[in-house]
Image (cartoon, helix red, strand yellow):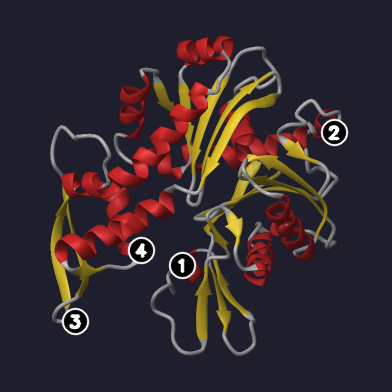
């Protein structure tokens, strides 16, 4: 019998860029973490993709908000509205008939007590009655299918929108970890800065994200690729279209990517020798949307000398793993994964 059969349980990967809900062992909601609110009444107008399409195009009565910044809740009310809106998106046949929900929420491994409290409070205000939190690298490892309770070391590098979480996991717990606020959003910001400095053109966050996804690269490509991007000329103030190459993107992303490589190196330096040997044998696994930037696995492999793999369905690994914890909630309450899940909240 699958979980959720008689209880109303959901797992949420509350991401800076995208939020995913797992219900009944399936991903039922996968939407951008954006809400649109009425400026005058604070009423929710749209959530997810509909709200994202409004970004940068708002009129005087609408404001769009990304409630999470750098992996943590930056706008409490908007986060609550977003979680409520996302829960309502669960297909009608799975709709809840009572407001009581049991939730497991994925959080960055470097979350402070205050940040965890913010997640808990937002989840409670959105209808949650029993809230559990699991650190994202642990959830990612579970989502990949790694036996986290085995006496073997594994390293997970989860590059999301707001944070990069790096963890060495063994015997059901985290041995060494690091969480840095350098991830997909900072890639976009670096591209915006580069375009302003190199081409004297201002582009929006959405255009920067499209460049990153389409031609972004951090390791030399066999063949150069190009993309047209439209922005505002900072001299004339008029719209202008320019052609950008992948090698330019590599230059733009050099600084944020080197920060991630350094953080991985730092965690490896602090890893006990026996576990370091396991990682050398088994390789490093990358998850999260940021890991899909072309060549990031190759660059990390070159810098560490360790084989680097990108997980299948890298974007949804944390959500799937968070959902799996609901299968084993009683086991988790026995502290088998006490390092991965927080029960004081």
Circle 2 SS class: helix
Report the residue marked by disc 4: 206
The residue carrying pointer 2 sits among few (fewer than 14), some (14 to 19) or many (20 or more) residues within 10 Å by Cα, namely: few
Report the residue marked by disc 3: 237
Mark found first going from the N terminus, 4 or 3: 4
Q: Does 322 sit above or below residue 150?
A: below
Mark found first going from the N terminus, 3 or 2: 3
Rendered residue at 65%/66% (across/down): 85
Q: Nearer the viewer, mark 4 or mark 3?
A: 3
The residue carrying pointer 4 sits among few (fewer than 14), some (14 to 19) or many (20 or more) residues within 10 Å by Cα, namely: some
Circle 3 SS class: loop
Report the residue marked by disc 2: 333
320 vs 132, nearest the viewer: 132
Q: Does 266 sit above or below residue 344?
A: above
Q: Nearer the viewer, mark 3 or mark 2?
A: 3
Query: In whole angstroms, how far apart are the C-alphas of marks 4 and 3?
Result: 19 Å
Query: In whole angstroms, how far apart are the C-alphas of marks 2 and 4?
Result: 42 Å
Mark found first going from the N terminus, 1 or 2: 1
Q: Does 212 sit above or below residue 3?
A: below
Q: Nearer the viewer, mark 4 or mark 1?
A: 4
Rendered residue at 44%/27% (across/down): 265
Mark found first going from the N terminus, 1 or 3: 1
């Amino acid at each position: 019998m699958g979980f959720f059969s008689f209880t109303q349980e959901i797992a949420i990967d509350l991401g800076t860029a995208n939020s995913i809900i797992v219900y009944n062992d399936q991903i039922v909601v996968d939407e951008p973490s954006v809400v649109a609110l009425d400026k005058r009444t604070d009423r929710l107008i749209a959530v997810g993709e509909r709200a994202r399409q409004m970004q940068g195009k708002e009129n005087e009565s609408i404001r769009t908000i990304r409630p999470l910044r750098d992996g943590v809740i930056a706008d409490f009310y908007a986060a609550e509205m977003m979680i409520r809106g996302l829960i309502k998106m669960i297909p009608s046949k799975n709709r809840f008939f009572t407001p009581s929900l049991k939730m497991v929420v994925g959080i960055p491994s470097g979350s402070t007590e205050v940040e965890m409290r913010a997640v808990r409070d937002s989840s409670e205000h959105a209808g949650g009655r029993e809230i559990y939190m699991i650190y994202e690298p642990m959830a990612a490892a579970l989502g990949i299918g790694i036996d986290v309770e085995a006496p073997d070391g594994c390293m997970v590098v989860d590059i999301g929108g707001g944070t990069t979480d790096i963890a060495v996991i063994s015997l059901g717990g985290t041995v060494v970890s690091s969480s840095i606020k350098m991830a997909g959003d900072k890639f976009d910001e670096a591209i915006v800065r580069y375009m302003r400095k190199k081409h004297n053109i201002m582009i929006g966050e959405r255009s920067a994200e499209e460049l990153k996804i389409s031609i972004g690269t951090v390791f030399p490509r066999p063949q150069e690729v190009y993309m047209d991007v439209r922005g505002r000329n900072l001299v004339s103030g008029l719209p202008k279209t320019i052609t950008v190459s992948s090698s330019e993107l590599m230059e733009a992303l050099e600084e944020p990517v080197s920060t991630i490589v350094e953080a991985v190196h730092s965690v490896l330096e602090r890893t006990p020798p026996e576990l370091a040997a396991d990682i050398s044998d088994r390789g490093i696994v990358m998850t999260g949307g940021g890991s899909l930037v072309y060549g990031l696995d190759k660059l990390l492999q070159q810098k560490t000398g360790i084989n680097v793999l990108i997980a299948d369905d890298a974007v949804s690994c944390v959500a799937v793993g968070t959902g799996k914890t609901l299968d084993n909630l009683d086991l988790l309450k026995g502290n088998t994964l006490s390092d991965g899940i927080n029960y004081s909240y």
